[in-house]
Image (tube, rainbow, N blue to C red):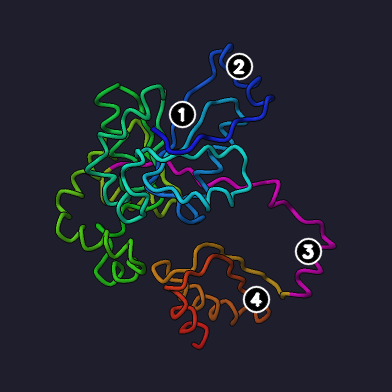
Amino acid sequence: MSEDKPIQPPKHRKALKQRHKKDGNFLKIAILYSHLKELGGAERVILKQVDMLHKKGHDVECFFAYLDKNLRKESANPHCFTKSFFKSPIPNNPAVRIVSSLPLAPLSLSAFSKKEILICHGYGPGPWIGYLNKKVRGTKYVSYIHSPPRFLYLSKSEKALWRFNDVRETIFKLSRAAAPVLKIIDRIGIVNSDAVLANSRFTAKRIQAIYGIKAKVCYPPVDTEAFRILDQKTVQKTRKKFGSPLILSTGRVVAVKRWEWLLQILQKIAESFPTATLAITGEISKENEEYIKKNCSN
């Protein structure tokens, strides 16, 4: 059902899969999300899960309603097997595919006919497809929640911050008209999961409040090859250059994440630790440049 052929795994990965299959520990897994059009937090977690599960010898593919082929090629991870669960006649346009992913979810089920478990990320089509596939085939699925749908459950002012681009604006307008139905679909997909995971305690509290479910907190993985404990000499150089304590916060710099709160907190910290430094890293989209300028000027 895919438009693209996945990258083939190295020979030693194939050998590892064969050994796991022989030992009875080999699983065919599908990881689902609405889109891969940027490398935000959720997307990086998904790609890292694919990589880690492949290293364990499992057969893993990730499926998206919309797939930016150029972005996929920019990923340096050779084990990220990415596909779209839609056939090519549906235009490969982010707004069209993301919005269509719920009503056309039944058409995607053939892509998962040989999968033994589905890991469904976020809101949107993932948990809903997991539920439909479970009803049809009895396949178990896990819902990994990064945040309950912001366009359904945030306050009016927060929703205004969330819809900062054309795709989100389209989703928001449709959600206003179909909110009751979308909330039902969202709830059915989550409460019927065989397991529900949250990416933080904060998200787990929101899941409890919205769905009445106690989710298990499963923090995003840390790449220990890229992030490691520094030797004291390097630590001292860093402190001398940037100050101490050095507070690092990383993520997409968008207004809905309320980065200004972190700046306000830093002012309080600086009262007790005058040499404290805040470092913020992350992608800044054109739509949020004014938000950055406003907070930098303040």
Which labelled disc corresponds to residue 18?
A: 2
* 288 over 99 or under it: above or below: below
Choose the circle earlier in sequence order: 4 or 1.
1
> Which label is found at residue 276?
4
Secondary element at tag 1: strand
Spatial CA distance of label 4 from label 2 is 52 Å
For disc 3, the marked residue is: 235
Residue that extends furthest to the bottom in the rendered view of this protein: 297
Which one is closest to the eye, mark 1 or mark 3? 1
- Residue 226's disc is none
Marks 4, 1: nearer the viewer: 1
Instruction: Determine if residue 207 is in view.
Output: no
- Per the image, label 3 sits on a secondary structure element best described as helix
Q: Secondary structure at mark 2?
A: helix
Question: Which amino acid does the dot numbered 2 rest on?
Answer: Gln
Q: Are marks 4 and 2 in contact (CB under 8 Å)?
A: no
Relative height, residue 171 to residue 160 (above, below): above
Q: Which residue is drawn at the image coordinates 60% and 28% (left, top)?
A: 56
Check if mark 2's residue and mark 1's residue have beta carbons within 8 Å: no
10 Å crowding of disc 2: few (<14), some (14-19), many (20+): some
